Image (cartoon, rainbow, N blue to C red):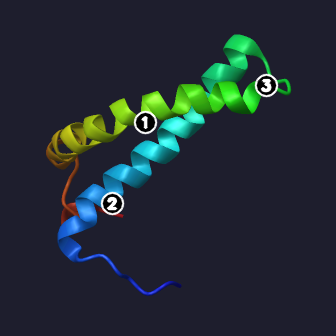
Amino acid sequence: MARPFLPRRWESLAFGLLLSGMMSCLVSGLSTAIASGVDMAFPARWLSAWLPSWTVAFPAVLVVAPVVRRIVSHITLPEDSCAD
């Protein structure tokens, strides 16, 4: 495993960058394939859909992730109160 090189304070930004990049890549690829098919021009169409999507997804993840974490913490039981 690679040695960490980012300070811990950048963790949420790195998380948001990677999550939004991966998810927007997958979703834009699927949407592009469904909408226009897969042919020789597909990679260029996918890239032209993915990059603008990522510019929206990254800040959205930074805003939405803390809200989702709070919601999940309210709808789940603490680890020690779960019965097997």
* Res. 8 image quadrant: bottom left
Q: 23 or 5, which is in the foreground?
A: 5
Res 14 label? 2
Q: Amino acid at mark 1?
A: Trp
Q: Position of residue 28 (x, y in %)?
A: 57, 28
Res 41 label? 3
The structure residue drawn at horizontal position 37% and vertical position 34%, both measured from the top left corner, is 55
Query: Mark 1 sits on what residue?
Result: 54
Q: Position of residue 80 (x, y in %)?
A: 20, 69
Counting residues from the start of the chain, the first of labels 2 and 3 encountered is 2
Q: 71 or 35, which is in the foreground?
A: 35
CA gap between label 2 and label 3 equals 31 Å
Counting residues from the start of the chain, the first of labels 3 and 1 encountered is 3
Q: Nearer the viewer, mark 3 or mark 1?
A: 3
Q: Amino acid at mark 2?
A: Ala
Q: Label 1 neighbourhood size at 10 Å, few (<14), some (14-19), many (20+)?
A: many
CA gap between label 2 and label 1 equals 14 Å
Q: Label 3 neighbourhood size at 10 Å, few (<14), some (14-19), many (20+)?
A: few
CA gap between label 3 and label 1 equals 20 Å
Q: Which type of secondary structure does the marked residue at label 2 adopt?
A: helix
* Res. 70 image quadrant: top left
Q: Is 15 located above or below residue 30 in the figure?
A: below
The structure residue drawn at horizontal position 32% and vertical position 50%, both measured from the top left corner, is 16
Query: Is the C terminus in the top left, top right, bottom left or bottom right quadrant?
Result: bottom left
Q: Amino acid at mark 3?
A: Ala
Left or right: 48 as drawn, with respect to 81:
right
The structure residue drawn at horizontal position 55% and vertical position 25%, both measured from the top left corner, is 49
The structure residue drawn at horizontal position 71% and vertical position 22%, both measured from the top left corner, is 33
Q: 42 or 4, which is in the foreground?
A: 42
Counting residues from the start of the chain, the first of labels 2 and 1 encountered is 2
Q: 24 or 64, which is in the foreground?
A: 24
Q: Which type of secondary structure does the marked residue at label 3 adopt?
A: loop
